[in-house]
Amino acid sequence: MGHSHGHGHLSDISHVLSPYAKWLVIGALGVIGLAVVIGTVVLWPSDSAHPIPPQFRAADGGSIHTVDGEVVDHIRADCLNSVAGTVLDTADVPVNPVENGPCILHTVRLDSGSDKGKYTVLEVPTNRAQTGSGPDSVAVAPGALDDPQAGQPTLHDGDDIRLSTVPGPDGGDRYTFFDFQRGRATLIWALLFVAAIVLVAAWRGFRSVLGLAFAFLVLGVFTLPAILAGSSPVAVAVVSSAAILFVVLYLAHGVSLRTSSALLGTLTSLVLAGVLSWLAIRTMNLTGLSGDQTTNLQVYQGGISISGLLLAGFIIGTLGVLNDVTITQASAAFELAAAGEPTRLATFRAAMRVGRDHIASTVYTLVFAYAGSALPLLLLFSVAQQPLGSLLTTDVVAVELARSFVGGIAIALSVPLTTAIAAALVRPMGSAAQSPTPAPSRPTAKPRATPTSAPRPTPPPAPRPTGRHSLPE
């Protein structure tokens, strides 16, 4: 009886805790959502012009204007040809070819712009142009003499490229190489990405792709313009991240208590990641000035806080990995409860066993993702002949290490936090099966009052033997 009474007590807790936890989570998410809306309104960027950095500025001070082109032919010739960059009516280049010449002249057909249908010439110097006996000569391996110099493009006939226009001395446009056209290849890979996601995850995968598109929309329409407008990068990053999480999680996984528990766990973990990022930046004296992009931004957008921008990058960088961990933990808790875990504590313990394995694999993913992005830098440091400890504590490496440390700690803390929230919301099947019949269901016992269930008359006692060994009544 005592054992049965104990299960009844756990069942009572099960029936009482879930509604309170449900409304607590819904209320907390409602308050956070209202704060996100207010923050978006307050931080919304104004339409103001910003100076263009020199690397993105045309000769007239405006933005760079580009046109499309296709490489149709090439010849070898001497360098410093006056025809380079000029507009030609035909593909015939008025230059005498030179066998093994130090420069490659590429004929490019212009496919857009005011000179569409005409041609221009791009001159690309090779390593052969640097060889010789002068003070500026460079020792080059014989097999690399005909390769373009460092920083010069390697072009082939049929390549689709982009050319930038610069005003010429005669008032017309001159053309220089700007970049390769990647629109078609990028679109193909994007379609393959969407097809793979939708093929495996079906409708939910398509909704996750829509959520990803919304995330990029928030970054492009709100996050970047708000930071450029002078708003606090940290405040903008927090509001942007929360807005993205609200839409992405509910869009990809549906509106449910399971998703709500993952969302609340992610938002709370995001706040923890922000605090940890701030502590890491302060204690490690990270400046974020080791990157060329950050230095250029400080020169031409001096009103932006570089330390705040670094902290905002830390916060936004933890979005994806936290989302992955928290939704997995919430799903594990709900599935384990539905599978028959008797109590919420048992559900929490079982889900934590799943979470520990997830932490171990995700930390590897996080660290190696940062290591892969910094691989060229690591190669440079490997030949610097400096002590390993000195290299690891340089600002550029320490920033990546701090990202890994903060991300790993945030992941580790998000697992028990999200699991506890999800376990508070589940209704374990085991406890429901063992719970006593509640009072409102007692009227269902009325059918027992039938003639078949009435007390039966006591039959007369059977005759007892009258032997001498018989015992009296």
Image (spheres, rainbow, N blue to C red):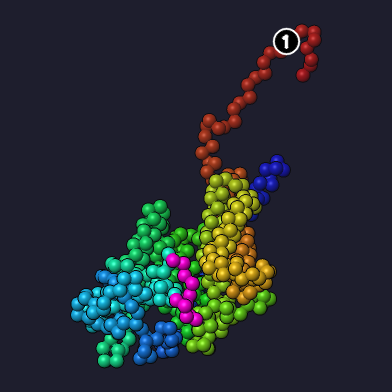
Q: Is residue 438 above or below residue 153?
A: above
**What residue is shown at x 79% (from left), y 15% (from top)?**
471
Residue 57, visible in the rendered structure: yes
Residue 97 locus on image (x, y percent): 28, 74
Asked whether 243 falls inside the magenta stretch, the response is no
Residue 320, above or below 340: below
Residue 24 in sight here: no
Would residue 81 appear left or right of 230 to someone viewing this image?
A: left
Q: Residue at x 50, y 79 (%)?
A: 293
Q: Which residue type carries mark 1?
A: Pro
Where does the image place residue 113, in percent across and percent down from the top left?
25, 80
Horizontally, residue 413 falls left or right of residue 71, namely right
Q: Quadrant of the N terminus?
A: top right
Secondary structure, mark 1, is: loop
Residue 358 in picture, x, y percent from top left: 58, 55
Boundaries of the magenta span: 132-142
Residue 259, compared with residue 94, is above or below; it is above
Residue at which label 1 appears: 465
> On the picture, is 458 further left or further right than 220?
right
Residue 408: image quadrant is bottom right
Question: How many tags in the picture?
Answer: 1
The structure residue drawn at horizontal position 34% and vertical position 82%, both measured from the top left corner, is 80
**Residue shown at 52% from the left, 76% from the top:** 237
Question: Picture coordinates of residue 332 (x, y %)?
Answer: 55, 53
Type of secondary structure dominating the magenta stretch:
loop
